[in-house]
Every structure is written in structure tokens, then in C-alpha cells.
Image (spheres, grey):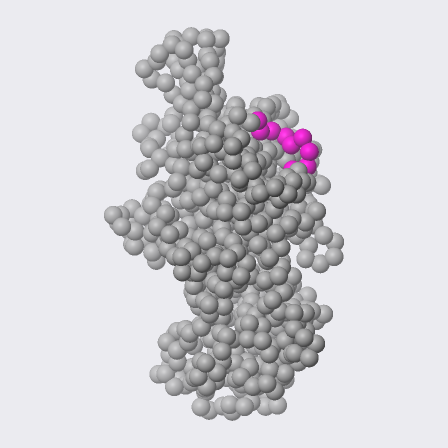
């Protein structure tokens, strides 16, 4: 196991903490990733704003990776390693992990994992070869105790301390940043908090400065992402061990590792139980987690267990895991903040684009009903042109569509049906609801946020009839809003305007948004075969930072979550033929249908659609509760313009949980809608340009976590409750 950490003197720690506070203000973000729409698409074919959002802190142009740790005051947090079973539900693997030590890696774990993959592929499968001896691997984690004052918390040996106050101190606090899909962590994750856990770092610092002891900050990388590679390759035989259930069990076991590594766990007895010399070590197994506790030899009627109060933090998929970790292991995790967590798995996710449509009409972020209507008109024109060969050539020219490497030299890219679907998927991504940042640089990217994109879409000043404007009020549906009319499938043209002029203008403006979103020097990639070829690579690159985790995440969508952003009915603002002929067969495979998104699960992994892929989301929801979660002390903040809120637990669902009143749910499972905010914007490091609603959300979340820490303080008479309260 990892040797117990020695903490510096309090005065030195206060000085280091002040230096760290100053350094945090100028630091960059840790490598991490938010959930991506259209998960089969390669990172490098995404619009610039979305690419930067998906890999916050990683340079998307020349220059490679940035690391804030280079400027860390003192030594940057080091890599740590915990030994894990390959399969937490195989007793042989669990026993093997218990017997093998954790700690610092003797060599580079990434290269070691890749070497192991090379060796094992010369025999049978990794699973079959290693099964008799038990299969284990090493998972990477980081820790930062700069804001952790252990003198203010109970120690496992407090009962034998000469300080009478020691036994009356509260249990230690640990803030766990849960890892997820995408690029791996670096040391910044426990320093700035990165894009998912900056709120945890900020709260730990606040509690420390208020002399409440602060919190130990730890972060655990997700299996099969970053450097945490169980088998060193991504073949099907290995990916079967990549599930959220395995990841949750990793985190549960890790909690015991942290408690042992920092000396935070033990059973306290009265002074009558004898001196410390009479204390022996024993192991307590609970759900594959071994906690090393100090137990007095003499019997005592009132033993008090010391164990850290762990609060899990995460945003997006890590937010899902944070909430589920509290639900699955309430004896190990006392609370969780599940930010922008789409906890309801769904094979098809039409709600994603529906929320994008609502964002385009949201005045708070620069949208308007007119913007939404013009966008719908533009996509209708795209559909009309896509039906004819000459129209497809015009689209290829207007939108600078890349030549397809997988097509013959004489075959234009949009002649293949699957490439047309890719083209439409690319166009839906240019409207940055998920990544909306009101403070983005419009000079560098005029379409970097909703305000910028809508400004381009509604600007008709360059059209032949500059006085012409789209009118949506009172045009055909008794004054219904554009949002309502699109939801109901009603999309009449404005009878007072010119069909040819208005549709052509909307199309030209859509092309302008695409040029701004992708950059003048980039073409729009619509090569479906190239995307699948990229996902079919089963080997890991030489440099772990070049691995984005795309194949691993697509596997998880196939076997657990779905999340396929379908757009194949009139309720979608990007529905590809609202103004075109209603013959769906004529349009073929252009629409973003479930069939288009799910077929790669077959071609890449050989999965049976009906037996595995189609029921996967339902099975996941049966285990987790979906948007009717159980448990307590889980907070669910969501952003109003974040498309992932369509599958999140939001305030309007508080009355939908069985056996609980809406008031009870609001108290035990509070949810929060952050007006105008994008995908877990409040979990990012604070900036002067942050929206007022985001700043307020951080304050609300911090106050809720502080309240839960008070509730779980065993020294507060009448306030301590069970983990299920």
C-alpha cells in the first residue's frame, strides 16, 4: 500500500496554501473531456469551439499539451497508483488485488501496459491467460493536501491522545474528483480542479481559510482512459471490462486506499481499552473495499469508527458516476455533486437537438425566435439541394466539404448516403449550445457562441434585398412561437416573403456560420468511413496524451448508454426536410436516424443490435433509476442551454420520484437550473467574465455541501444521521 503521507507543519502549510491560492488564479485547466454529441465522429473534424470544449486545457492547434503544474508553488502533485482487480465481480481477481501492493509505479505504467498487451496477444486472450493467477492492474490517481489541516479532524488514535479534545473532533473530509471519458488527468486536476472539479478545489480552500479543516483533494482516473490502461490495448476481449459498474467499484475500492494511505480510518475506543501498544491491525471487507482499521484488543461497548467523509464531484459522465457512487456505496461516500449529469440513458436522444433549438431562441444568450426560424429554413434548403446531384455539388462548394479519402477520385463526397448524414451532423455541431461561452473571442471565431452564430444567421444585409426580413409572428399558426411550431411539426414559410430569396439567404448565412465555426483554413469533413476506421484502432499510441479515448467511449455508448443524437422527425430544429418533398425514401439515409448511429456498434464490435445495443439503455436505467434516482445527498445542477439537460434530473422532475413528496426530494436530492449556462460551466475555474448565474450556482453548491458536512459531523448532537437520510 502507499506509505502514509507526512504533512508539513501548520505554519508552513498555511504559507504554501497562500502561494497556491495566488497561483490558481493564473493556472490553466487539467486535461479532461465533456460528453460529445455524435460520439462516432473524430475529434479533429469538430468545429473549433466544440473541440476546445471537449478537450479543455489541451491545445487543439500546434503546441501540444499545456500543463499548469509547471508553475506549481513547490513540487507538483505526483502520480500515485492503486492496484485494482480487472474484474471486481470475479473473486479471483479481487483476492489477487488484495495481495498485491499499491504505490508509486516502478516504471512508466503506460509503456508497461502496452508491453503487456504485446506479450499477451502472442498467446490467447488477456483474460484467458491471466485467469488462474488473478488479474490485476494499476490505476492512476493524484492527491493534494495543501488545503487539508488534519489537526482539526479526528485521528484513528485520538482515543489514546493526551489532548482530550482530539476525540471530539469531526471525521476528516475528502473531496473526490471522479474521472471520466476522454483524455487523461494530469497533476492540475487536484490543483485547479480542471473543468470538472474546480468547485471542489474552491470549496476546500474556503473551508481551510475559514479554519474548518478544509479537505484532502484526490482524483481517480477512469479505467481505459488516460494512463489507466488495464490491458494495454482496446480489443473486444479487453473492452468487456469497461463498464460504469466496474468504474464505480474502482472508485469504491479507491476510497479505502485513500483512507489507508493518509491514515484517515480506524476504530476508536475509550481510553479504558488500553494504550496504543495494545492496538492491532485488522481488515474489514465491504463491497470489494478493504479498509485497514485500528481495533482495540479489549472489548468496548461503544467503539467509534473513524472514516473520512467523502464527497464525490464530477461533471457530465463523471457527474453521472459521482451521483451513482453515492447511491451504490452510501457507506463510503456521504454526498455527491452530479453536475450536468445525463443520468437517464436513452438509445435515441432527440432531446439533445431540441434543447439546442431552445437555446437558439433564448434571448439571455443572444438567441431569438427569428434565429431559430432562420436556422430551420436553412436546413430545409440543405435538404432540398441534397435530393439532386447538382444540388449536392452546390453544397460541397458552398460549405467547402472535404474530399473523401475513402471514395474514388471521381466520386464526390456527398454521393454516399452515410456521408450526407455526416455532413448534416457536422452542421448541427456549429451551433455551440453545449460549449456556449458568452465571453469567447468573436474576433477569432465569430460563431463561437449562440449570440455570434445567431447574429450571422439573422443578418440579411448582404442579400440582394437588404430590407427583407424573416417574419415568424402571426405567419400561419395563430402567432405561435417558432419553438412551439417546430415542436409540433408546423413549419410554413412566411407567406409575405420571397421563398427563393429567404431560403437562399438563410443557406448562405448557414455557410458563413460553418466557415466561422470550422475556420477559414479547414474544410467540413463528412467522411463516415474515415470516422469508423479511426474508431477501429485497437492499439494505444506511444504517447498517452495522444490518446483521446474515442473508441472506449463509443463502446460504452453501445453497451450502456446510447445517447445517439437522432434528428429524424419534425420536432428537431435541424430536421433535414421540413420544406422538401415529404417522400422520406427519396431522402434515403441522410437523416440522423438511430439506424445510422447504431450500425457502427455492429461493424466495430460485432454486437447484436437487438440483443445488446437496443436494450442497453433500459438495463442501465433499471440499475440506476435514470431520472428517478434513489438515495440522498446528491445535488444535480444543470445549465438551461446545455443540451444534455434533456436527460438530466432537473427541478421539474422533483415530483416524479416514487414514494417521496416533491418537498422531500427537493431536500434530499436538490436540483438546480442555472439560467443561461452551458455544460457544467460552474465546475470550471472561475473567471472575471463568468455569468452572474454561474457565480451564484457555485455559491449555492458550496452552501449545500457545507450543510451536508454539518449533517455528517458526528460531534454535532442531534445532527448526525444515517447515510440514507
Magenta residues, start to end:
101-110
The location of residue 299, given as percent across then percent down, is 35, 12
How many circles with numbers are drawn on the protein?
0
What secondary structure predominates along the stretch shown in magenta? loop
Image quarter hosting the N terminus = top right
What residue lies at 51% left-to-right and 43% top-to-bottom?
Answer: 178
The location of residue 441, given as percent across then percent down, is 65, 63
What residue lies at 49% left-to-right and 25% top-to-bottom?
Answer: 264
The location of residue 565, given as percent across then percent down, is 48, 65
Please identify the residue farthest to the front as the structure is shown. 123
What residue lies at 44% left-to-right and 60% top-to-bottom?
Answer: 609
Residue 205 quadrant: top right
> Is 456 on the left or on the right of 331, as rendered?
right
* Position above or below: 38 against 572: above
State whether residue 166 appears in this view: no
> Is 381 on the left or on the right of 68, as rendered?
left
> Is 336 on the left or on the right of 685, as rendered?
left
The location of residue 700, given as percent across then percent down, is 44, 47
* Position above or below: 341 against 133: below
Amino acid at each position: 500500500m502507499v506509505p502514509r503521507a507526512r504533512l508539513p507543519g501548520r505554519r508552513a502549510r498555511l504559507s504554501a496554501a497562500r502561494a497556491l491560492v495566488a497561483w490558481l488564479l493564473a493556472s490553466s485547466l487539467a486535461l479532461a473531456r465533456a460528453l460529445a454529441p455524435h460520439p462516432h465522429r473524430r475529434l479533429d473534424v469538430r468545429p473549433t469551439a466544440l473541440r476546445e470544449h471537449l478537450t479543455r486545457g489541451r491545445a487543439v492547434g500546434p503546441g501540444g499539451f499545456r500543463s499548469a503544474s509547471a508553475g506549481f508553488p513547490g513540487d507538483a502533485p505526483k502520480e500515485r497508483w492503486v492496484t485494482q482487480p480487472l474484474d471486481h465481480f470475479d473473486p479471483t481477481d479481487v483476492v489477487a488485488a488484495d495481495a498485491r501492493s499499491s504505490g508509486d509505479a516502478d516504471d512508466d505504467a503506460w509503456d508497461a501496459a502496452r508491453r503487456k498487451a504485446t506479450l499477451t496477444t502472442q498467446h490467447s486472450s488477456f483474460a484467458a491467460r491471466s485467469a488462474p493467477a488473478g488479474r490485476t492492474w494499476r490505476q492512476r490517481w493524484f492527491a493534494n493536501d495543501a488545503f487539508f489541516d488534519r489537526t482539526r479532524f479526528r485521528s484513528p488514535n485520538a482515543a489514546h491522545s493526551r489532548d482530550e479534545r482530539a476525540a471530539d473532533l469531526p471525521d476528516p473530509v475528502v473531496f473526490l474528483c471522479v474521472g471520466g471519458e476522454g483524455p487523461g488527468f494530469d497533476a492540475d486536476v487536484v490543483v485547479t480542479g480542471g473543468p470538472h472539479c474546480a468547485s471542489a478545489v474552491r470549496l476546500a480552500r474556503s473551508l481551510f481559510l475559514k479554519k474548518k479543516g478544509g479537505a484532502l483533494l484526490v482524483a481517480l482516473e477512469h479505467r481505459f482512459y488516460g494512463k489507466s490502461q488495464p490491458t494495454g490495448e482496446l480489443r473486444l476481449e479487453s473492452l468487456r471490462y469497461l463498464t460504469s459498474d466496474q468504474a464505480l467499484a474502482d472508485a469504491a475500492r479507491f476510497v479505502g486506499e485513500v483512507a489507508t494511505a493518509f491514515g484517515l480510518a480506524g476504530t476508536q475506543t475509550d481510553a479504558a481499552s488500553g494504550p496504543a501498544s495494545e492496538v492491532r491491525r485488522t481488515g474489514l471487507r465491504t463491497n470489494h473495499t478493504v479498509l485497514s482499521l485500528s481495533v482495540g484488543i479489549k472489548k468496548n461497548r461503544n467503539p467509534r469508527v473513524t472514516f473520512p467523509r467523502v464527497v464525490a464531484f464530477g461533471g457530465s459522465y463523471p457527474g453521472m458516476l459521482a451521483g451513482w457512487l453515492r447511491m451504490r456505496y452510501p457507506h463510503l461516500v456521504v454526498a455527491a455533486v452530479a453536475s450536468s449529469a445525463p443520468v437517464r440513458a436513452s438509445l435515441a436522444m432527440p432531446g439533445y437537438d431540441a434543447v439546442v433549438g431552445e437555446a437558439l431562441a433564448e434571448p439571455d444568450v443572444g438567441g431569438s425566435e427569428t434565429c431559430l426560424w432562420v436556422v430551420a429554413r436553412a436546413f430545409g434548403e440543405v435538404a432540398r439541394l441534397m435530393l439532386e446531384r447538382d444540388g449536392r455539388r452546390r453544397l460541397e462548394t458552398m460549405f467547402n466539404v472535404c474530399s473523401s479519402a475513402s471514395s474514388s477520385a471521381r466520386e464526390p463526397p456527398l454521393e454516399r448516403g452515410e456521408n450526407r448524414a455526416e455532413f448534416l451532423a457536422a452542421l448541427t455541431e456549429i451551433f455551440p449550445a453545449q460549449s456556449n461561452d458568452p465571453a469567447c473571442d468573436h474576433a477569432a471565431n465569430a460563431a463561437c457562441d449562440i449570440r455570434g452564430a445567431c447574429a450571422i444567421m439573422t443578418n440579411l444585409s448582404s442579400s440582394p434585398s437588404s430590407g427583407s426580413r424573416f417574419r415568424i409572428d402571426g405567419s400561419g399558426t395563430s402567432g405561435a412561437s417558432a419553438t412551439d411550431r417546430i415542436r409540433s411539426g408546423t413549419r410554413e414559410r412566411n407567406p409575405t416573403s420571397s421563398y427563393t430569396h429567404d431560403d437562399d439567404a438563410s443557406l448562405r448565412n448557414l455557410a458563413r456560420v460553418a466557415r466561422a465555426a470550422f475556420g477559414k483554413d479547414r474544410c467540413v469533413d463528412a467522411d463516415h468511413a474515415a470516422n469508423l476506421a479511426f474508431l477501429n484502432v485497437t492499439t494505444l499510441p506511444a504517447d498517452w496524451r495522444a490518446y483521446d479515448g474515442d473508441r472506449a467511449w463509443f463502446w460504452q455508448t453501445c453497451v450502456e448508454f446510447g445517447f445517439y443524437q437522432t434528428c429524424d422527425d419534425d420536432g428537431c430544429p435541424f430536421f433535414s426536410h421540413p420544406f422538401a418533398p415529404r417522400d422520406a425514401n427519396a431522402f434515403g439515409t441522410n437523416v440522423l436516424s438511430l439506424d445510422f448511429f447504431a450500425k457502427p456498434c455492429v461493424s466495430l464490435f460485432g454486437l447484436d443490435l437487438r440483443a445488446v445495443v437496443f436494450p442497453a439503455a433500459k438495463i442501465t436505467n433499471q440499475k440506476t433509476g435514470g431520472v428517478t434516482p434513489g438515495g440522498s445527498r446528491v445535488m444535480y445542477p444543470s445549465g438551461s442551454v446545455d443540451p444534455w439537460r434533456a436527460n438530466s434530473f432537473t427541478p421539474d422532475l422533483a415530483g416524479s420520484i416514487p414514494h417521496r413528496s416533491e418537498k422531500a426530494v427537493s431536500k434530499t436530492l436538490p436540483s438546480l437550473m442555472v439560467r443561461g449556462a452551458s455544460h457544467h460551466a460552474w465546475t470550471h475555474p472561475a473567471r472575471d467574465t463568468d455569468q452572474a448565474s454561474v457565480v451564484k450556482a457555485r455559491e449555492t453548491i458550496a452552501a449545500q455541501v457545507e450543510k451536508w458536512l454539518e449533517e455528517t459531523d458526528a460531534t454535532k448532537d442531534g445532527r448526525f444521521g444515517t447515510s440514507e437520510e
